Image (cartoon, rainbow, N blue to C red):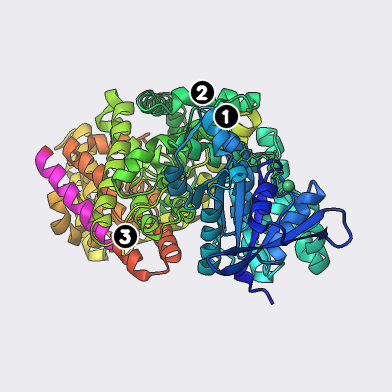
Amino acid sequence: MQNASSRIAIAGNPNSGKTTAFNRYTGARQHVGNYPGITVEKKEGTAHLDGIEVTLVDLPGTYSLTAYSLEEVVARRVLSEEHPGAVIDVVNSGVLERNLYLSVQLLEMGMPLVLALNMMDEARSQGININVERLSELTGLKCVPMVARKGEGLDDALRAAVELAKDTGGRVAPLEISYGTDVDLALKEMTPIIEEAKLMTDNYPARWLAMKYLERDEEIIRRAKKINPALSDKLKARADSLAAHLKTTIKSYPEAVIADYRYGWINSILKNGVVKGADDVAHDDRVAFSDRVDSVVTHKIIGPLILFTILYLMYYVTIEVGAIPNEWVANFFDWLGGVVGDSLGDGPLKSLITDGVIAGVGGVLGFVPLIMIMFLFIAVLEDSGYMARVAYIMDRVFRFFGLHGASIMPFIISGGIAGGCAVPGVMATRTLRSPKERLATILTVPFMTCGAKIPVFLLFVSIFFDAHRPLVMFGITLCGWAAALLVARALRSTLIKGAPTPFVMELPPYRYPTFSGVVIHTWERTWQYIKKAGTVILAISILIWAAMTFPSPTADEEKVFDDQRAAVASSHEAGAITDEAYDEQISAIDNQDMQQHLIHSVAGRLGTSLETITSPAGFNWQTNIALIGGVAAKEVVISTLGTAYSLGNVDADEDTTLADSIRNDPHWTIANAVSLMVFTLLYSPCFVTLMVIKQETARWRWLFFSLFFNLAFAMIMAIIVFQILA
Ligand code: GDP
Ligand code: MG
């Protein structure tokens, strides 16, 4: 009986030199037959190395591992069902890019791989220089230069394969690359279902099987359907919905998108100092065009300049143009509050509807137009493929701070370009293979300017920095980055020490974003925001309104104000004061009454008692209430301030926006505003993010770390800022 670990398969493209290598290894000790029932040749033989006997299988040459040809199906089956201990992947070094396409797929299947860089003699004579060490570092694979025809490198490759087989037992964690947001999402939904049902998972990785459904792989789908028809139909339906989505959004189909990202993965490896001197003749037009664009866009100096110009432009347009519809929406909610308020009698119901629901949710919805413009930009950047380049460019920076090139995506998703959300951001860290860099990323993505913090910044920036809005907003985003990177650096040299791992980022070819694609992607994100405003934010708004309304002052306390009003009224009747003075005094009393009411409430008491701690940072009790609410969801900071100022605002029928109220409140200076913005940027992640941190790290410890470390960090920074500016 053969021990599985001493069975090694030789895979590769046709004409890469597999048979030449196989013959050299096995000499005459070969057995040639056919795979049962089909005409594909099956070649096995034995080799002797360092005194042990190794069985070698020469797989049919293929460019891919789809089910387009019989050879591919056979190669795939042998690999997955005959369980070789390792695979020697023979590649033609002269056309590495095309040959590595098969390697990616072998890795996706979870095969332990030795990369045999064959035909090195030809590559060298063509002036192609391959940095084998760098290739090995980036792929994590043992790479052996080889000239099969002369027998060079053969023993090294076989020895590496035997060792790998011994170390891995024939299976390694499958390579999980990103295939773009849409495909990744489908895979993320399908993989756990396949895992749970154990559908063919003895032989194939679950994510790989899911991918086969997306690629419409007839062989796998047919076999899976026999085993579990209901599940298979369900998976197929999900694959169909992805196909339909891709068709409308980018006029493409899943197979093509997946292939693009595989090439993108290879592309980014080869560009990372692996190959010098290769010509691009073999490329198709689209790839050649992408390469030309990339030579500028990912250039060491020009690349970052373009990146910053694009980001700044995005801020400029979003904030300058977005301000216009933003005001319309804000005015609409003011008007609505007035109309609804007039139609309801005074009392708690009116207060609930106007101060709680309309002021709270309206404050959040008011930012929809602006956020929509921002999402529009992001959709264009993502759909065109530029977003992947951003990651690539930023990699050098990230390494310095102990993070991973792949950390960039979670950062961007969380709001690195503003307007994201840390919840999917934390989840996106799953693509990071190093646990330490992953953890450092998870703990620092909440410092980004997520979509919920933006309204807070916009509000105060428009009040205090109206002339420089884009610049200040851009600066805030950079502050978020600075905080994240510095904390990451600190964490990586204290709590989460460890060496960095090499990274590979997908650089798929550029494509023109389609109009419908951009519209759909923009709308998807905007709708998420609106939905959140209508559900979570609404519920929290009502809770906070109640906390700000109850308990009401006692009758005795109310009587003080009633007496004051009566006194003013009687002196007015007596003609002692003018009409104007009367109005003024009454509204002053009303105002005090309202303030008293608010201070008396649960939230008011909490906010007031916290003032001793927060006053060095310049927060008043209204701010304290808002910030406590912000742990539930950051949008609540605005809605709570809205409610606080709306409750405390006597001239309810006059059109006063929250911005006006703050502008008119002597408490608010630039120092308070900046301090609040710094605090909002840095303090504890919202409730949902905290839960996701717990889920992704599987440790309560990191939830509490995020909650308390960020809180303390934010408080210290806010105090410093306030003390300097005040
Ligand atoms: P297979 O299709 O992968 O089995 O490839 P073969 O082993 O049949 O090789 C294809 C051709 O490449 C043959 O003409 C070999 O002689 C040639 N070849 C194989 N290895 C090398 C090498 O390292 N250098 C060069 N220059 N030619 C090689
Ligand atoms: Mg052959």
223 relative position to 589: left or right: right
Q: Which residues are magenta?
A: 708-724
Quick one: 162 or 284, which is closer to the camera?
A: 162
Q: Which residue is mark 3?
A: 706
Label 2 CA crowd tier, 10 Å (few <14, some 14–19, many 20+): some
Please state the horizontal and vertical placement of residue 587, each as a whole percent of the image: 24, 42
Label 1 CA crowd tier, 10 Å (few <14, some 14–19, many 20+): many
* Mark closer to the observer (1, 3): 1
Q: Amino acid at mark 1?
A: Tyr
Q: Which residue is mark 1?
A: 510
Badge 3 element: helix
Q: Residue furthest front?
A: 28
Measured Cα–Cα span from mark 2 to mark 1: 9 Å
* Mark closer to the observer (3, 2): 2
Quick one: 487 or 128, which is closer to the camera?
A: 128
Q: Residue 466, located in which quarter of the rendered image? A: top left
Measured Cα–Cα span from mark 1 to mark 3: 37 Å
Q: Residue at x 71, y 42 (%)?
A: 14
- The answer to whether mark 2 and mark 1 are in CB contact below 8 A is yes
Compare marks 1 and 3 and give the one earlier in the sequence.
1
Please state the horizontal and vertical placement of residue 705, each as a whole percent of the image: 29, 63
Q: Is residue 340 magenta?
A: no
Q: Residue at x 34, y 65 (%)?
A: 702
Badge 1 element: loop
Picture quarter with the N terminus: bottom right
Q: Which residue is mark 2?
A: 293
Within the displayed image, which quadrant is ligand 1 positioned in? top right
Residue 368 seen in render: yes
